[in-house]
Amino acid sequence: MTIDVPQEILDALTDVDMPRLPAEPGPSDVVGLAGVKVPIYRAGCVVVGSGAAGLRAAVEMKRRGDHVVIISQSAWGGTSACSGSDKQTLHTANTADQGDNYKAMARAIRSGGAMDEDTAYVEAVGSSRMMASLQFLGLPLPQDPLGGTLRYQTDHDEVGRATSCGPRTSRLMVKVLAEETIRLGVPFYNQTTAVKILTGGDGADRHVVGIVAMRASDRTEENPLGIALFVSGVIVLAAGGPGELYRDSVYPNGCFGSLGLALEAGVELVNLTESQFGIGTRREGFPWNLSGTYVQAIPHIYSLDTEGAEHHFLAEYYRSAQELASNIFRKGYQWPFHATRMLDFGSSLVDLAISRETAAGRRVFMDFNRNPPSVPGDLPFSLERLDEDVRAYLGKAGADQDMPIDRLKHMNPLAIELYRRYKIDIAEEPLEFAVNNQHMNGGIMVDTWGRSNLGGCYAVGEAAGTHGVTRPGGAALNAGQVFGTRAAEHISASLRAKRHPTGDITDIAEAGIADLLAALRKESPLTVKSIRLAVQARMSEKAGIICDQESVGGALIEARKLNAEIRADGIAYGRAAEAVRSVQWRHMALASEAVLSALDFFIRNGGGSRGARAICDAEGESLPLARSGPLQDYRFRKERDAHREEQIIARLDGDEIRLSTRANRTLDESARSFFERDWPAWLTGRIYDLGADE
Ligand SMILES: Cc1cc2nc3c(=O)[nH]c(=O)nc-3n(C[C@H](O)[C@H](O)[C@H](O)COP(=O)(O)OP(=O)(O)OC[C@H]3O[C@@H](n4cnc5c(N)ncnc54)[C@H](O)[C@@H]3O)c2cc1C
């Protein structure tokens, strides 16, 4: 079997052009607020963010006749447009030869615990419709000659529910959804960053009345920072994940998400302890995940010390060339770090070993022109001496070439092509990489319609905390589509976004803008750079894959101190363009305190190792072993079963992050719908539970 695909087909899957945005509608008014002449835009609903999730919400609302606008920091920025891997994955019900079982799929989605059972079912049952509608819009998912979708197995996926358009599945999703928003005439305000959510009412009646944004194109002499007011009673936060939280990160540059923005508005967050980390190239170069065929080709992984000497460090961990090579291969579909996979010489020892090398100041590389060398005392690497699952896979794929680069070329030529686009030729040179933060599984707490605890505020995509401890690869993109649609259906049924609000929110807006400006102080000793360095180093060094109670507790004290300083001194900015970054870094510092608070709370309450993090403890029950001996410093606590049944909630109360827990919502798997009985609830809109919004 050889893959012989013409170059122009490969090009079309790697260089994905985006459509031209239409002209932006102007403001309805310009009003003096807090000493600034502020343009006013009115909308039935404002979608914040133009990744795959936000665009889906906007398309679905517009098709239902809602008055929706999109505002976006960067139209084609964010992870959907700019991230990927060798085969970027969409996880949907298996539509190949055997069909699927949605309840079984839901169980698999939430199998890592700390996930609402109803949410998992919503994602499972909604996935077929999401896939079909994306195909209808033109997403080129691969099919067999009879119309079945081609499938493969990915992380946390025993069945093979993954599919992919190639390295840039999510960018292609953004493209087809953006074309649809343009065709439908959804107003799109680009280079427009939401900086403050405005609310009215008190207690349980508190609700959204608008959003303050900063827009380069609204900068004038009377409005030097380009402040703009979007008056709207409904917002959908689709601002993606907090990529800037960590120094060691595979997110594209400039991903701030909306956790800080939400906390400041009193929105509750959930599962902030849960993230994904794994191997990839960092955002300083071309940020990309090294999963799938990159590692299934079994390249040689080595490090260079400051003197330039090479170290075959994995040989200190694995007992034979077979074990070493097989575990490099398994990183392909066991991509995210998982503490328990450090045991029994499993594949997460690879992540641990790499992060120890980088922490020791060594640079780590993948060389596709060398097979892994052997380990001392063992036979050399051979494709004949691999674990059975690995040998079977490579055999089936016909990947029997001598060199990793030829195996990669054979299995997935796009993987090589992609790096070439960014002037990195992995066929010629070794590729530098590291263990990076990649995804936030937690986020804004929402119900099964994407509603947060703040009236009128919905969250979808990575902004929402719908995932549990683990998620199958591709479930993030599916969840964004399902919840983008669900939120739109709910908003539309509520009739609240049919037209823009006409009420007067001058007092609330004036106070909000004054508050925002008060935190921007030219003379402050705190700068964007100093805050970024402090937050990112702290998060990567103390809240990465290896944690312990003492260092997380210490990091939390430092994070609180930083936020107290920001409250006292504000943040400096130079040019007007920097002011928006100052606000975003204030939000990020707050988000960082919230993540560390949740992590500290979890560990102090006996929380063990799960998902992204190993919680190290000298008394821990689990001890990873290496060829060189037991790794005592990495002895870790086991997960407690009770923690799988609950989620940690974080909210801002005055200046403090408050934490609590709640049980996962459940799903009665024996319940069955019955057409005649249940139809009226659909016909009358009772399924939307709108009473809860009144
Ligand atoms: C390297 C990598 C590989 C990945 N691979 C996969 C995969 O194979 N399968 C999978 O399911 N998931 C994968 N993910 C995760 C997935 O890409 C994201 O979860 C998903 O794309 C998030 O989509 P989104 O629409 O929520 O956010 P994004 O696509 O990040 O979009 C956020 C949008 O919000 C805008 N924005 C941000 N802040 C503001 C603000 N304050 N005001 C206005 N606009 C704002 C941004 O400009 C952007 O338009 C991967 C992630 C990475 C980093």
Image: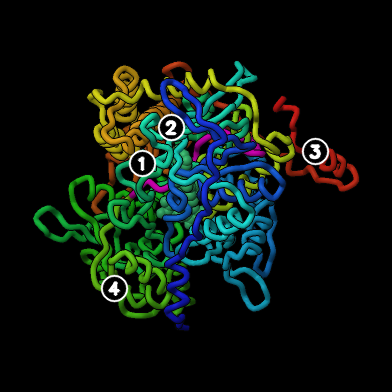
- Sooner in the amino-acid sequence: mark 1 or mark 2: 2
Q: Secondary structure at mark 2?
A: strand
Q: Residue at x 39, y 28 (%)?
A: 590
User: Label 2, on which residue?
Assistant: 227
Q: Nearer the viewer, residue 327 or 578?
A: 578
Task: Return the x and y of residue 563 as percentages of the image width and height.
Answer: 34, 23
Q: What amino acid is found at the position of numbered circle 2 in the picture?
A: Ile
Viewer-closest of 331 and 188: 188
Marks 3 and 4 sit apart, C-alpha to C-alpha, by: 58 Å
Q: Which residues are magenta?
A: 436-450
In what element is the residue under mark 4?
Answer: loop
> Residue at 68% of width from left, 60% of height from top?
100
Say which of marks 3 and 2 sits in front: 2
The residue that disc 1 covers is 244
Residue 614, located in which quarter of the rendered image?
top left
Q: Which mark is residue 352?
A: none
